[in-house]
């Protein structure tokens, strides 16, 4: 059984279609990354899945429960971590966890809270007010609170925004540990390194799911060609390349220039022209990265929100 | 698993709410400071006078003298005889319930005594719980009645025998013989203070969760709208209880307000009233989108309820439409109950109708709140 199996989800706010026929399946135990620019409908899609929003169109099940009729049962089995910290800042860490434990009717409350605090290394800070915690600790508290009731599915909405790299690394180690125990995870993110730690990814833009699959599949299916340029005066080379037919992206990376295009023949012609004009510039085939693919997606899709 | 209600989940919400209440020092100070401030301010500042007050007539004979006096009292503009009581007991009940402000008793032998020249007496009992309201009516009384009687005698007997048989008007100021203004203001303040603080605080109950972003989390977890409502509303019931104790003690200590009736009856009425208030506040918070809106809605509600409930100005001084409008405020009914119980010593039958109004408000507000509650973020 798939943990998430939804198809044709549509959500409109007024005359804006925020989620436009999104179809998604996530197998049990899988970690799926959910990528897309700001305002692309990631949060709305996740909220539909955890029963916080009702879709205008579309059907599907989450953990086998119908998203239209069984949202209360979904809420009990799902752990949802909101994008913005949404626990009580005027309650301490343990008070917040006790609150959650009681809402899920976990018994005995103290034992569950103590165990959760221990697991996430929050014991020493248990009496600190949540509002005084740094971003990393808030994120840890939020994760602790949403896994305490042993959900079968975790929905994480940009969980690592504003968190330092070490904390992010630890967070992801924790996610993988939980997934190896059978938990399914759907996580939205902007970070490419995080996307690469997922089993599969889905890319959404302006409400439309543009690509799904493993990182390699998504990169391969994008059909992009990348060249790496080296030599003197790369800034002038970059200016010369921009706007030429076949050249979609020009981005400096240290002492090199990455040039990406979806039409290989046109791209090669453009590069040959520039190579002639600028002495000493060498062109080598490069590897297309996930980031290149995403930039391509973002510049390619029309903003239907404007 | 029961999805509609569980004590454990309610307990979770209650504990959380109490902790937050304790952390919020300013609000906590406001809950105790505002009542005292308002009590002292309004208690000493407000004073005021109305006409066309409902009166009951207890008259067993229908002689010309009786009719003359009743007509004269009515022409003063102060009295409006819309009740005719058969007995003193009935009149007493009408007054305790607040249906009439005056009871005019003209004895059966009045006409005979006038004709015999044997010091005829009439008794006027005034509801002095609002002394200002009654004072004008009482001051004109004696002169008007005497003149009316003389005119009536003049018509009966061609030769007026003025000196014979002076009319004796006996005035009883009921419930508040010294006419102390605070006796009227202070019990009313109990209601106004409760309304001010409780409606305002509960009106931001949900909008605060929404604005702080915690609503999303609360909705994502398994808690039913009914649990959330009770979890928000019950802590303030306790706050209301504390306020009642503060205001009643202060009434006794600072203003020496007499307490005529049953304290348990008053407290029961207060409980229903407070429940109606916190539910009203909660209903506002299901309608408002932001805390600011909630406070605006609250104030929008406050002003008419204070002006039209009979707290600021005598209810009977208002035109009919305003009196009808005043009925839609819980405060109106609560003021009648407190004044009746505290000052008149009214028993349950006399205030049962008003309590029924409050119960209806509780049902109405809870119903609207539950219907309005948004279970999703749509």
Image: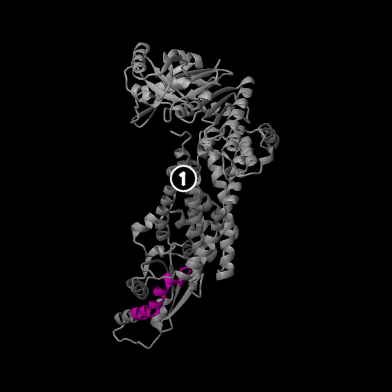
Q: Residue furthest front?
A: A279
* Vertical placement of residue A75 versus A123, above or below: above
Residue B49 covered by magenta stretch = no
Task: Name the image quarter holding the C terminus of chain B.
Answer: top left
The quarter of the picture where residue B257 lies is: bottom right
Q: Position of residue B43 (x, y in %)?
A: 49, 68
Residue B146 colored in magenta in the image: yes
- Please name whichever residue, B314 or A271, is drawn nearer the observer in this view of the structure: A271
Relative placement, left or right, of B191 versus B114 is: right
Q: Can the viewer see residue A7 in this picture?
A: no
Please tell me whether residue B239 is drawn above or below residue B105 in the rendered image: above
In the rendered image, residue A245, in percent from the top left (x then y), is placed at 31, 17
What residue is shown with label 1? B285
Whether residue A219 is visible: yes
SS majority, magenta: helix
Along the line of sight, the residue nearer the viewer: A50 or A237: A237
In the rendered image, the residue lying farthest to the bottom is: B163
Report the magenta residues as a range.
B125-149
């Amino acid at each position: 059984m798939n943990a998430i199996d939804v198809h044709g989800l549509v959500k409109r706010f007024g005359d804006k279609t925020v989620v436009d026929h999104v179809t998604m399946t996530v197998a049990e135990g899988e970690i799926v990354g959910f990528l897309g620019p700001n305002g692309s409908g990631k949060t709305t899609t996740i909220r539909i899945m955890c029963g916080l929003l009702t879709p205008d169109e579309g059907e599907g099940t989450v953990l086998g429960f119908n998203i239209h009729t069984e949202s209360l049962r979904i809420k009990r089995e799902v752990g949802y971590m909101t994008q913005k910290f949404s626990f009580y800042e005027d309650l301490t860490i343990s008070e917040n966890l006790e609150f959650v434990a009681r809402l899920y009717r976990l018994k005995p409350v103290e034992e569950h809270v103590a165990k959760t605090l221990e697991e996430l290394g929050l014991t020493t800070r248990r009496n600190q007010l949540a509002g005084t915690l740094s971003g990393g600790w808030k994120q840890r508290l939020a994760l602790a609170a949403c896994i305490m009731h042993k959900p079968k599915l975790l929905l994480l909405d940009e969980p690592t925004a504003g968190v330092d790299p070490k904390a992010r690394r630890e967070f992801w180690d924790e996610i993988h540990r939980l997934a190896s125990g059978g938990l399914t995870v759907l996580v939205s993110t902007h970070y490419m390194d995080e996307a690469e730690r997922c089993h599969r990814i889905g890319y959404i833009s302006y409400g439309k799911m543009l690509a799904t699959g493993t990182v390699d599949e998504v990169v391969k299916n994008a059909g992009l060609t990348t060249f790496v340029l080296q030599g003197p005066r790369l800034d002038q080379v970059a200016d010369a390349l921009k706007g030429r037919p076949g050249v979609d992206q020009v981005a400096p990376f240290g002492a090199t220039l990455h040039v990406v295009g979806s039409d290989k023949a046109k791209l090669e012609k453009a590069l040959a022209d520039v190579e002639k004009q600028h002495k000493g510039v060498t062109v080598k085939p490069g590897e297309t990265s996930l980031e290149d693919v995403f930039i391509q997606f973002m510049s390619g899709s029309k903003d239907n929100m404007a | 698993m029961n999805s509609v209600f569980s004590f454990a989940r309610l307990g979770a919400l209650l504990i959380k709410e109490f902790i937050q209440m304790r952390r919020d020092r300013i609000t906590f100070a406001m809950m105790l400071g505002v009542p005292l401030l308002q009590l002292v301010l309004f208690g000493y500042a407000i004073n005021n006078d109305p006409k066309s007050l409902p009166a009951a007539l207890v008259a067993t004979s229908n002689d010309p003298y009786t009719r003359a006096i009743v007509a004269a009292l009515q022409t003063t503009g102060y009295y409006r005889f819309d009740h005719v009581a058969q007995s003193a007991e009935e009149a007493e009940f009408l007054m305790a319930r607040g249906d009439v402000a005056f009871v005019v008793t003209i004895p059966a032998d009045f006409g005979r005594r006038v004709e015999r020249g044997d010091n005829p007496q009439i008794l006027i009992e005034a509801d002095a719980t609002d002394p200002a309201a009654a004072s004008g009516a009482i001051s004109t009384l004696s002169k008007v009645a005497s003149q009316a009687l003389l005119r009536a005698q003049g018509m009966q007997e061609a030769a007026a025998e003025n000196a014979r048989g002076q009319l004796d008007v006996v005035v009883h100021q009921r419930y508040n013989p010294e006419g102390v203004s605070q006796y009227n203001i202070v019990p009313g303040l109990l209601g106004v203070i409760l309304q001010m603080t409780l409606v305002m605080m509960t009106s931001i109950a949900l909008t605060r969760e929404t604005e702080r972003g915690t609503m999303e989390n609360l909705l994502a977890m398994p808690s039913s709208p009914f649990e959330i409502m009770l979890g928000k509303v019950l802590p303030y019931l306790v706050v209301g209880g504390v306020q009642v104790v503060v205001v009643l003690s202060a009434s006794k200590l600072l203003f020496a307000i007499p307490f005529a009736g049953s304290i348990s009856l008053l407290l029961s009425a207060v409980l229903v009233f407070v429940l109606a208030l916190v539910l009203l506040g909660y209903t506002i918070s299901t309608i408002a989108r932001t805390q600011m809106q909630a406070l605006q809605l609250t104030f929008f509600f406050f002003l008419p309820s204070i002006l039209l409930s009979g707290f600021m100005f005598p209810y009977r001084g208002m035109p009919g439409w305003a009196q009808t409008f005043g009925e839609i405020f819980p405060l109106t009914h609560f003021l009648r109950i407190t004044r009746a119980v505290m000052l008149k010593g009214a028993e349950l039958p006399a205030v049962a109708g008003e309590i029924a109004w409050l119960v209806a408000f509780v049902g109405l507000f809870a119903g609207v709140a539950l219907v309005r509650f948004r279970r999703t973020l749509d």
